[in-house]
Image: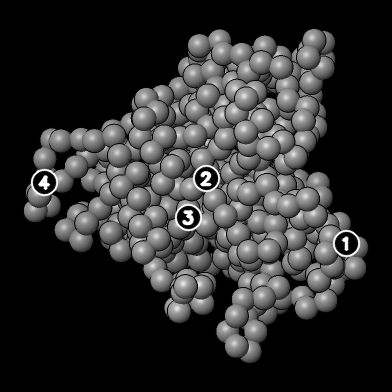
């Protein structure tokens, strides 16, 4: 929506003009899952006054137990989207609240506090995203496969025939993005079989996070109408390039709306200002712990492999930055913007954006310098040579990144404190860092999957040696 409504009355006007009968009132929990209630538009006044009620424990990870009071979600009117593919339906997003107060576990609330801190410093954090997804299905034996059986080229990136076979779906998706006022500037067939990418122009961090949540919902839902599954899973196939969710970031002057990362006279030749280099240095400084937020699943780290000489995976492997060089973690491909190629879309964009902003601001406050840009093809540099050059490798698994997150005091402060119940669920005055709650949750996830006996293990070890 080009001109987002700012009030309940403005929302009502949009609903009336578009003959909307129902509204999805939505929020996302810590893992990134979206939950919603379907509310008749006739109940708009009640929705804005009292919110949509949820049993938070049933919805997912949001810091609640079965004994906890309801979560209330009062919509942010600026998030209103008239759903393009379903007549009479709209969608809004809100923060989770409990007893009328902010709920510190809510990812959207966490991001809002960090963007407010940036604004107090005179900055607006703007970010765009490149969302990669794969169209898949199950074969007659229940095995996952690429939905398009003809999409089997060894190097299918930009394949015009593969893109043409999915023309109806991808053009419909592009039209919806444009209809929503987000300006899709390209769709392409990506590097893996069945993989596509939709590029969306930047906005402020909260707007972009809200857009990305709706985009994921829209892509998955519309794909089902074509009888296929759109997955954003980081690594759905062992032998194919994985799905990323790249961030393109900049800081703007809060008063003058000027890109503060832009410097055409940059002596390093990348078009980046001193402030931009400091922000990049902050991301690099906090990269090991930061990854627990932007690569938040066990599967994430199966994507984060350099690949072989014949099969590249287009992901970073080391804590570096450079110019228009896709083997770097941070890529400065155009004046005034920093692309992080690390993130995937298996978690919450609100938490990922919070981590990126907190790390970048720390780089600015400490006036960090990332050094000279790296120009190497890092896929061809052996790990021991990287070590000799003083280049740090990125974490290899979720357990490693969570370990670094626990030690990162800057990220601890950024994510704040959350309330803690007593032993038997009784209210207390105790709090803990959100990071500790998140780390326990992610380590439980890590061990749950690590403890599973896989088909591969059975094949390898059943009668070994």
Quote the CA–CA distance across marks 3 and 2: 10 Å
Q: Nearer the viewer, mark 4 or mark 3?
A: 3
In depth, the one of 181 and 126 nearer the eye is 126
Residue to which mark 2 is pinned: 396
Q: Kindly report which numbered mark, 3 or 2, lies closer to the viewer in this rendering.
A: 2
Residue at 40% across, 41% down:
402
Q: Which residue is mark 3?
A: 298
Question: Disc 2 to disc 4, how far (Cα)?
Answer: 36 Å
Q: Residues within 10 Å of mark 4 (few under 14, many from 20)?
A: few
Which label's residue is closer to the chain start, 3 or 1?
1
Of residue 96 and residue 348, the one placed in the foreground of this image is: 348
Identify the secondary structure beneath mark 3.
Answer: loop
Q: Earlier in the sequence, mark 2 or mark 4?
A: 2
In this rendering, the label closer to the viewer, 1 or 2? 2
Residue at left offset 73%, top offset 25%: 374
Q: Earlier in the sequence, mark 4 or mark 1?
A: 1
> Taking the image as drawn, is residue 248 in sight?
no
Nearer to us: label 4 or label 1: 1
Label 4, secondary structure: give it: loop
Q: Are marks 3 and 2 in contact (CB under 8 Å)?
A: no
Give the mark count.
4
**Crowdedness of circle 1 by 10 Å Cα count: few (<14), some, many (20+)?**
some
**Residue 189: which quarter of the image?**
bottom right
Q: Looking at the image, can residue 63 be seen?
A: yes
Q: Find out whether the residues at labels 3 and 1 contact each other: C-beta distance under 8 Å.
A: no
Residue for badge 1: 159
How far apart are the two marked residues, 4 and 3, measured between alpha carbons?
A: 30 Å
Q: Residue at 72% of width from left, 41% of height from top?
A: 379
Q: Which mark is residue 422?
A: 4
Question: Residue lying furthest bottom in this view?
Answer: 140
């Amino acid at each position: 929506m080009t001109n987002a409504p700012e009030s309940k009355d403005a929302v009502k006007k949009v609903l009336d003009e578009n003959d909307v009968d129902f509204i999805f009132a939505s929020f996302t929990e810590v893992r990134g899952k979206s939950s919603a209630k379907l509310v008749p538009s006739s109940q708009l006044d009640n929705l804005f006054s009292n919110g949509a009620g949820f049993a938070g424990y049933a919805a997912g990870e949001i810091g609640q137990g079965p004994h906890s009071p309801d979560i209330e979600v009062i919509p942010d009117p600026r998030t209103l989207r008239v759903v393009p593919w379903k007549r009479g339906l709209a969608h809004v997003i809100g923060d989770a609240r409990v007893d009328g107060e902010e709920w510190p576990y809510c990812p959207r609330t966490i991001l809002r506090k960090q963007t407010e801190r940036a604004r107090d410093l005179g900055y607006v954090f703007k970010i765009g995203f490149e969302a990669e997804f794969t169209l898949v299905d199950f074969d007659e034996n229940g095995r996952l496969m690429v939905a398009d059986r003809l999409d089997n080229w060894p190097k299918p990136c930009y394949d015009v025939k593969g893109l043409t076979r999915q023309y109806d779906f991808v053009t419909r998706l592009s039209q919806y993005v444009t209809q929503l006022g987000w300006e899709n500037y390209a769709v392409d067939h990506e590097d893996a079989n069945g993989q596509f990418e939709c590029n969306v122009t930047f906005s402020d961090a909260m707007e972009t996070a809200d857009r990305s949540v709706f985009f994921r919902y829209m892509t998955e839902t519309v794909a089902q109408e074509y009888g296929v599954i759109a997955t954003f899973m980081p690594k759905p196939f062992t032998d194919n390039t994985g799905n990323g969710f790249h961030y393109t970031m900049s800081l703007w002057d809060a008063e003058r709306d000027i890109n503060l990362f832009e410097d055409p006279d940059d002596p390093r030749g990348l078009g980046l200002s001193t402030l931009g280099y400091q922000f990049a240095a902050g991301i690099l400084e906090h990269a090991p712990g930061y990854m627990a937020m932007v690569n938040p699943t066990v599967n994430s780290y199966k994507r984060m492999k350099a690949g072989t000489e014949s099969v590249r995976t287009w992901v970073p492997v080391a804590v570096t930055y450079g110019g228009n060089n896709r083997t770097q973690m941070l890529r400065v491909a155009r004046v005034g913007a920093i692309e992080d190629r690390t993130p995937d879309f298996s978690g919450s964009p609100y938490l990922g954006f919070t981590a990126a902003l907190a790390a970048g601001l720390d780089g600015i406050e400490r006036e960090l310098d990332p050094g000279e840009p790296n120009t190497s093809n890092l896929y061809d540099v052996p790990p021991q040579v990287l070590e000799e050059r003083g280049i740090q490798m990125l974490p290899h698994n979720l357990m490693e990144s969570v370990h670094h997150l626990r030690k990162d005091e800057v990220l601890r402060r950024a994510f704040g404190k959350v309330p803690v119940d007593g032993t038997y669920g009784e209210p207390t005055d105790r709090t803990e860092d959100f990071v500790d709650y998140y780390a326990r949750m992610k380590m439980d996830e890590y061990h749950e999957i690590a403890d599973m006996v896989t088909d591969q293990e059975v094949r390898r070890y059943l009668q070994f040696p």
